Amino acid sequence: MDKPCVLLADDNEATCILITALLRSEFTVEVARDGGEAIEKLKQRQYAAIVLDLLMPLVDGYAVLEFLRSEHPHLLGRVLVVTAALSPRDTERVKQYDVCGMVAKPFDVDALFHAVRQCAGDPGEPLRGPLITGGMLLLLAEVLRRV
């Protein structure tokens, strides 16, 4: 059985590695390094969920949200914003898009995994993953940062 596919749009390589490792027990993950690449991928494929950073070079996450609002408004309910930029102003701005949810970086591993499952439309089953704790995630992030 094919796993549902998640689009992860984030310019931070360590974050992409961590989130991909976290989700791969239940999802196939495609990565876009900026909003422009994310928009191109969204034109070509349907995704079970979209994990979106707001602050990316070239084309930011807000441009992706605007693209979805104008071209695929039904997909906004599958977007999980995962970003360090969650000021009250940003939070209010993101809420205007009626996304599935918002998670601040640094994130709790279990909360992120559960939020992605909810955005993908599968909140009911017991979690099979992740097999990584928050402490392990921080250690792994530190190792990746030094590489």
Image: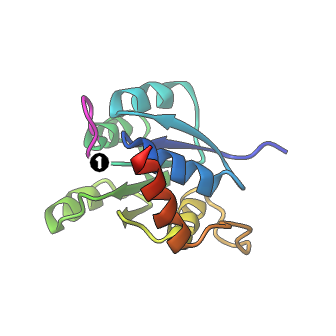
Q: Nearer the viewer, residue 105 or 87?
A: 105
Q: List x then y, in percent, for residue 84.
A: 28, 59
Quadrant of res 71: top left
Q: How is the image coloured?
A: rainbow
Image height of 51 relative to 72, above or below: below
Please report the residue visible at 51 percent of the width from the left and 58 percent of the height from the top: 140
Q: Is residue 38 left or right of residue 55?
A: right
Magenta run includes residue 8: no
Q: List x then y, in percent, for residue 118.
A: 57, 64
The residue furthest right is: 1
**Residue at mark 1:** 54
Magenta run includes residue 55: yes
Quadrant of res 46: top right
Specify few, some or many for label 1: CA neighbours under 10 Å numbering under 14, 14-19, or 20 or more: many
Please indicate, yes or no, whether residue 51 appears anywhere in the rendered image: no
Image height of 134 relative to 116, above or below: below
**How many numbered discs, if any?**
1
Task: Tell me the quadrant of the picture where the C terminus can be found.
Answer: top left
Q: Secondary structure at mark 1?
A: loop
Q: Is residue 97 left or right of residue 20?
A: left
Most common SS among magenta residues: loop
Please report the residue visible at 62 percent of the width from the left and 67 percent of the height from the top: 132
Q: Is residue 95 left or right of residue 127?
A: left
Q: List x then y, in percent, for residue 40.
A: 44, 24
Image height of 112 relative to 59, above or below: below
Q: List x then y, in percent, for residue 28.
A: 66, 43
Task: Tell me the quadrant of the picture where the N terminus can be found.
Answer: top right
Identify which amino acid the numbered label 1 is placed on. Answer: Leu
Quadrant of res 110: bottom right
Q: Is residue 63 left or right of residue 2?
A: left
Please indicate, yes or no, whether residue 82 appears anywhere in the rendered image: yes
What's the magenta region?
A: 54-60
